[in-house]
Amino acid sequence: MSEERSLNFIEQIIEDDIANGVNDGRVLTRFPPEPNGYLHIGHAKSIVLNFGLAQKYNGKTNLRFDDTNPVTEDTEYVDSIKEDIRWLGFEWDKELYASDYFDQMYEFAVELIKKGLAYVEDATSEQIAASKGTPTTPGTPTPARSRSVEENLDLFERMRKGEFKDGEKTLRAKIDLASPNMHMRDPIMYRIKHAHHHRTGDKWCIYPMYDFAHGQSDSIENITHSVCTLEFIPHRPLYDWFIKELEIFPSHQYEFARLNLNYTVMSKRKLKQLVAENYVSGWDDPRMPTISGLRRRGYTAASIRGLCERVGVQKRDNMIDVGLLEFCIREELNRTANRVMAVLDPVKLVITNYPEGQVEEMTAENNPEDASAGSRTLHFSNTLYIEREDFMEEPPKKFFRLGPGLHVRLKNAYIIKGESVEKDADGNITTIYATYLPESKSGGDHSGMTVKGTIHWVSAAHAATAEVRVYDRLFKSENPNAEEGDFKDFINPDSLQVIKEAYVEPGLLKAQPGDRFQFMRKGYFTVDPDSTAEKVVFNRTVTLKDAWAKVNK
Ligand code: ATP
Ligand code: MG
């Protein structure tokens, strides 16, 4: 976190609270994921904020699984969420589950019933909705609203015991059917759901609603600053009402703008659909905006934290250009990634005046941005692979690469001149013939010749074969959520291109999953876990071109 930037509005609130001795200056935040999917980059924003606040103010952060909906939740998600938070570089104080508070929440509900502030409703959810009125007209009480405390206590206990079917009864808070805030018009606190819960098993058949569970969990844990996204602003009066009426620890809710990224979707429901319907290979497909997908794509934790810091903490929703995320990783990898040569679309090049069978060792610097990265040895011979696009039979004027009669430098090696080509029956070039200038060797060039272009290459006899997966945006539309019709209609059909036989420096056979490289002139790539000892699989993290910085500088 940069120390020079001004305080964001939540830091300002916390500093005021500390100055005023609120909670004796104690800061306890929480990150409350629902374990119904993998974390995405929007969650990273919330994680960086919640954990960052605690770090800055000597506080702590709880990880609380908001597991009050038995049907959609799973321990697979719990495990992945923990892995992703740790990978992002944060450690929670306590690992907690809202479901651990079900007994306490039940007691809270009984207390509100006893105070005449909650009642058991018979009406269906449709009937409740219809009787709630509109923002400008008050709702009308249902007959259940006038039930006695005794009857409510009895019915609520019978709800718990499983005497009623799903949807037959609910527990509602008795607040104000004329409130301009619809959330205050006797909101539902409990519903019946005869469903197995991933932690509590079959102990419960009634489950608390978000509004009743969330604030109460915050309060039970003595959370001082409960930070959530803007859509919860209208829920805040209800959050405060439950805490006041129950006379429990006064946690406070603060809202900030969620992180939205263009050319993707972030709702877990939608991401789950992409996985279930095989549009992607899984939650960690490198095209997914999930933390695990970004990790597999080659993003570092620092680059994701960096994005969250740059975006800042805002009070109004906005859309962040994915180019900013790419800028963050490019900036880091430019400093840290070793340069290597990889030919993605190979064509054979034979140097006719270089002795057949001779192998020379060339020295190549690993990273011009980092002298401590050292150097490596490359093998040079008379038969190489170069990129097909680096040769043109009829080059236009400013083509500074290879063509008949054109000179170009082979990186870390010699200047060569294009001579002739050999083609197959379809007219495709199969071999390019060239000659080299023996006195032009890199590092000791006394050829007196200057060339404008330098191209990369690998020696055919030494190169290793690699699979390279080239990714593009998952969606063609900048905001698939705002499009009419199904968001899946806007999936980019060309979001993955698989190159089965690319040629890379043989040293890359030793690379481990997660290692990151710059393929010179091609982009940044990372080793995918699908790699084997015989074949390395690379994912393209990002191209070299810096479109975002150009537009925004
Ligand atoms: P989704 O709609 O993707 O399912 P959610 O809000 O339901 O998201 P939760 O697991 O409930 O997901 O979220 C955990 C925490 O992360 C919440 O505090 C939520 O506000 C926050 N969060 C979720 N998405 C974003 C986002 N895009 N930007 C910032 N914070 C987010
Ligand atoms: Mg949620």
Image (cartoon, helix red, strand yellow):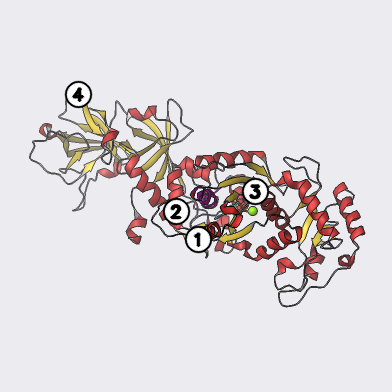
Q: SS class of the residue under badge 2?
A: helix
Can you identify the residue that label 2 sits on? 309
Disc nearest the viewer among 2 and 1: 1
Residue 57, position as x, y percentages in the image = 51, 50
Based on the picture, tell me whether residue 45 belongs to the magenta stretch: yes
Q: Nearer the viewer, residue 436 or 189?
A: 189
Earlier residue among tags 3 and 4:
3
Mark 3 vs mark 2, CA separation in Å: 24 Å
Compute the Cα span from label 3 to label 4: 65 Å
- Measured Cα–Cα span from mark 2 to mark 1: 16 Å
Of the numbered discs 3 and 2, the one sitting upstream in the chain is: 3
User: Which mark lies nearer to you, 1 or 3?
Assistant: 1
Residue numbers of the magenta segment:
31-55
Q: Earlier in the sequence, mark 1 or mark 4?
A: 1
Residue 448 image offset from top left, x and y in percent: 7, 40
As helix, strand or loop, the secondary structure at mark 1 comes to helix
Front in this rendered view, residue 345 or 553: 553
Q: In the displayed structure, does residue 280 sit left or right of residue 551?
A: right
Beta carbon at label 3 within 8 Å of ligand 1: yes
| Mark positioned earlier in the residue sequence (4 or 2) | 2
Q: Which residue is mark 1?
A: 12
Which amino acid type is shown beneath numbered disc 2? Glu
